[in-house]
Amino acid sequence: MAEREWILLNPGPANTSLRVRQALQTPDLCHREPEFFEVMRECRERLVGLLGIQETFGTVLFTGSGTAAVEAALTSVVPPDRSVLVINNGVYGDRMLRICRAARIAAEALSYDFTTPGAPVDVARRLRERPEISHVSIVHHETTTGLLNPVERIADVVAATGRRLIVDATSSLFGEPLDVAHEGIDFVTASANKCLQAIPGISFVLGRRAALEALAGWPARSVYLDLHQHWATQERDNTPFTPAVQVLHALREALVELEEEGVGARIVRYAENCRVLRRGMAALGFEILVPEGARSTILTTFRLKPGLTYDALHDAMKRRGYIIYAGQGEIRTYAFRVSNMGTLTPEDMAGVVNAFAECLQELRG
């Protein structure tokens, strides 16, 4: 089991390269030594450098999953006397609302069904009606279904009304086009183990420098996830808590790999992966849940064919070395998810389609 190479079709953790995994095998290192701070600084600089936003944005690293970065942003940037509008069209939009409730942050939802993107006109209307709202929060890629929200168009509306946008790009940053520095966007959160093709355990917030500096002196809602404390400490080449030392070494290697491939080239590869997958699955009779025009190119939710259960399909694919992913909540009963992020290639995705074809033949037999 430990030596088996699974093809991961779940939306993170994604398949990584051997050189990224080997980077974990660094000698034991104290996190207060300059050798570690060099690694941390390099990761922070590369993240904004790869996006060309190093002059206006900074990176804040957290040891934790993508949710840690989302929670750090929400609990740190919404003023005590203001509120946040959450675009909710999936499990991760709902998670933002749960974070706000747990932290006693005033929040309201602009809700849609799980296959409908947020509409800028609705956001504009709600912001006109609610002057107490200071921020809008949105998930770029809702991996609940593979829905892509129109972040830049919503950012235009947010900026026009004098508000600011928080973007959860956990499963899309470096895999889908996203103008992080678009006017109106102040904070973007993401994770190492998605389109970065690194190891789980590190998440981060990309913050507009002016917005990060403006947080100084605000009352903290969290000890561990205080965004400004992490930012100010990391700017001094230090860390408030013990980070995942080895995982940061792997992240640095993954960032070097991304620089070698190129952000644009990675986005193109993922899009081609997606094209091969969807074309092949359509030939097998599978239908896509999300309407065309609202789909990401990272993950596809397919409807289960009549008489086919997710558990049977999952187990048949796993016997062939492929790990697919269940739908969340009620969706599990009628659909399943296939991601094409990570080190996968179009040739790999052709193999995925062939495996599905074999499974259908087996399960019908």
Image (cartoon, helix red, strand yellow):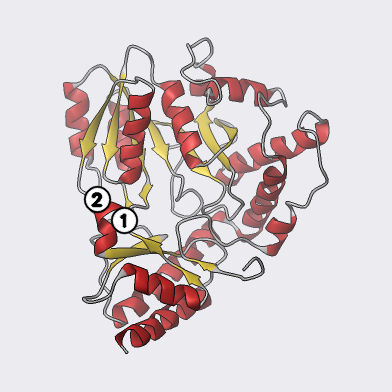
* 334 is higher (above) or lower (below) than 229: below
x and y percentages locating residue 253 in the rendered image: 70, 52
User: On the image, numbered disc 2 is attached to which residue?
Assistant: 114
Task: Estimate how packed mark 2 is, as few (under 14), some (14 to 19) or many (20 or more) residues with alpha carbons within 10 Å.
Answer: some
The quadrant in which residue 313 appears is bottom left
Query: Which numbered tag is attached to residue 145?
Result: 1
Q: Is residue 288 left or right of residue 213?
A: left
Total numbered labels placed on residues in the image? 2
Which type of secondary structure does the marked residue at label 1 adopt? loop
The quadrant in which residue 22 appears is bottom right
Kindly tell me whether residue 55 is visible in this rendering. yes
The residue that appears at 26% across and 45% down in the rendered structure is 89
- Quarter of the image for the N terminus: give it: bottom right
Q: Nearer the viewer, residue 317 or 136?
A: 317
x and y percentages locating residue 297 in the rendered image: 39, 61
* 240 is higher (above) or lower (below) than 86: above
The residue that appears at 62% across and 55% down in the rendered structure is 258
Q: Nearer the viewer, residue 358 or 36?
A: 358
Q: Give amino acid for label 1.
A: Thr
x and y percentages locating residue 63 in the rendered image: 60, 36
Task: Estimate how packed mark 1 is, as few (under 14), some (14 to 19) or many (20 or more) residues with alpha carbons within 10 Å.
Answer: many
- Quarter of the image for the C terminus: give it: bottom left
Q: Is residue 91 left or right of residue 188?
A: left
Kindly tell me whether residue 164 is visible in this rendering. no
The residue that appears at 80% across and 33% down in the rendered structure is 30
The residue that appears at 48% across and 11% down in the rendered structure is 219
For the residues bearing labels 2 and 1, Cβ distance under 8 angstroms: yes
Which type of secondary structure does the marked residue at label 2 adopt? loop
Give the residue furthest to the bottom: 365
Q: Earlier in the sequence, mark 2 or mark 1?
A: 2
x and y percentages locating residue 26 in the rendered image: 79, 48
Q: Give amino acid for label 2.
A: Phe
